[in-house]
Amino acid sequence: MLEGLLANAALIAVVMTGLWLIAVRIRDVSFIDAVWGGGMALLAVASWLQLGDPGARATLIMVMTALWGARLALHLFVRWRAHGEDPRYAKMLAKARERGAYAGGALKIVFAPQAVLLFLTCLPAQMGILASPDPAPLGALAWTGLALWSVGVFFEWVGDWQLSQFRADPASKGKVLDTGLWRFTRHPN
C-alpha cells in the first residue's frame, strides 16, 4: 500500500505543478476549487489502476469516488468559467501580485498547501481501494454504503442546482441562500 500511496503523491505533485504553471500564465488560481473533486477522482482511479485484479470492493470505491469527484469538478469548473476570478483568491494573492511575486505566492499560498490537503483528504478512498483487491462479492455493508452515497450525491446535486437558480435571479444579488437543500450542503452559506 505504501508504494501505491507514494506513487499517488508523486502524481498529484506533478499534476498540481502543471496546474500551477497554467495559473501563473493566466494569472488566476480560482480553478483550484474544481481541482479538488477532479483530484480525488484522479487519485481514486490511479489507486485502482495499480491493482492487478481490483475486485468488486475496490472497483465500487473507485467508481463512487470518481463519479462524485467528476460531478463536483465539472460543477466548479463551469462556475469558474462563468464568474471568473474568485474574490477570495484575488484577496489572498493581492500582496504577491503587487510585489510582482504572483508565481511564488500562487505556489506557496494556493497550490502547495492544497496538493497536500487534497492527498490527505483523499487518503480514505486511496487506502480503501489499495487495501481491497478482494475477489469476494459485495456484502450488505457495501450495498448500504452505495445507497447512502447515492442519496448524498443526489443531495449535493439538488443543492448546487438550487444555488445556481438562486444566483441567476437578479433579486438575489448580495443575498445568501439559506433555504432548500443548499442550506445543508455547504458551509459557510
Image: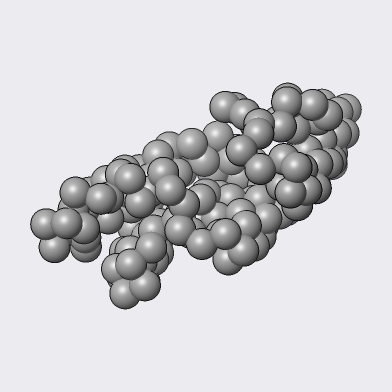
Q: Nearer the viewer, residue 28 or 118?
A: 28
Quadrant of the frame with the C terminus: top right
Residue at 46% x, 52% y is: 86
Q: Report the side of 186 relative to 123 (left or right).
A: right
Relative to 2, 175 lies left or right = right
* Colour basis: one colour
Direction front: furthest residue: 171
**Looking at this view, is 43 or 34 the one in front?**
34
Expressed as whole percent of the image width and height from the top left, the position of residue 92 reads 30, 44
Q: Quadrant of residue 98?
A: bottom left
Residue 121 visible? The answer is: yes
In this rendered view, identify the residue nearer to me: 42 or 52.
Answer: 42
Is residue 21 positioned above or below 66 on the image?
below
Res. 18 image quadrant: bottom left
The x and y percentages for residue 135 are 75, 47
Q: Quadrant of residue 76?
A: bottom right
Residue depicted at x 33% and y 45% = 91
Q: Is residue 13 left or right of residue 180?
A: left
73 and 182: which one is in front?
A: 182
> Which residue is drawn at the image coordinates 81% and 35% (left, top)?
155
Position of residue 157 measured from the top left corner of the image (x, y, whole percent): 79, 44
Say whether residue 2 is visible. no
Q: State how many labels appear.
A: 0
The residue sitting at the bottom extreme is 25
Residue at 25% across / 50% down in the picture?
Answer: 94
